[in-house]
Amino acid sequence: MLRQIYWLLWKDLLLEARRRDNLLSMFFFGLSLLFLFSFAFEISSENVSRMAPGLLWLAFMFSGTLALNQLFQGDRENDCLDALLLAPLDRGAYYLAKVFFNFSLMFLLELCILPLFGVLFRLDFWHLLPNVLLYTLLGTLGFSVVGVLFAAVTLRARARALLLPVLLFPLMIPVILGTVRTLQIILGAGAAAELAPWFRLLVGFDLIFITAGFLLLEWVLDG
């Protein structure tokens, strides 16, 4: 299975490296949203650690949804998806490869956006970067494991670009709450003990939905 995941992930990364449309559209959309938020909301220095994490995650989620809408597009062209489904391929490996691919795109986006986020909102969080990255990545994994499953569910829907966020965002509430609250605690210099319940929530969410997606993708694609 690891070999299948490797080759499927390599295929998607190679296609993205040739096109670069997903990553560029995600970056410019996320950056535009952050610019808009920073100028639309006059956040005082006392409130910036409380409000900025929510705005950051709005930018991440909307940008990530753009990528999810295009996630299976490369496989659908020239009926490649049908060929993949007819091949002796483990559907769980296909799901995990898509999760790792979407996670990689989101991680690259976050590496580019986080420094600009600090500049736009006047946040000096470089000494807190390990904790910021840890909880951002846990949230990003949660977004990817659920997002890939629902991108597959809406794969053949006519209005999938509209249907996907309607189905996805309500399920993402635990991830949004967990990541925004942990970033508020970290940027506000809160106690480490306050992070523990949110850490357990994010890890539990990731484990439950990655297991569900691994088991359900075959049923979703064949349904």
Image (cartoon, helix red, strand yellow):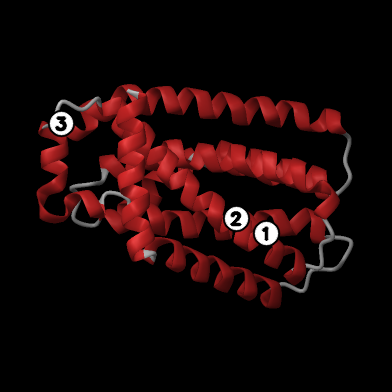
Number of the front mark, 3 or 2: 2
Q: How far is disc 1 from disc 3 in space, using C-alphas?
A: 39 Å
Q: Quadrant of the C terminus?
A: top left
Which amino acid, by three-letter code, is at mark 3? Asp
183 in relation to 145, above or below? below
Q: How far is disc 1 from disc 2 in space, using C-alphas?
A: 6 Å
Residue 114: which disc?
A: 1
**Camera-side residue: 98 or 146?**
98
The residue that disc 2 covers is: 110
**Camera-side residue: 127 or 5?**
5
The residue that disc 3 covers is: 222
Q: Judge left or right: residue 18 versus residue 201.
A: left
Q: How far is disc 3 from disc 2 in space, using C-alphas?
A: 34 Å
Q: Judge left or right: residue 208 versus residue 56.
A: left
218 in relation to 117, above or below? above
Which amino acid, by three-letter code, is at mark 2? Glu
Label 1 CA crowd tier, 10 Å (few <14, some 14–19, many 20+): some
* Residue 207: % across, % down: 51, 24
Q: Judge left or right: residue 55 versus residue 12.
A: right
Q: Earlier in the sequence, mark 3 or mark 2?
A: 2
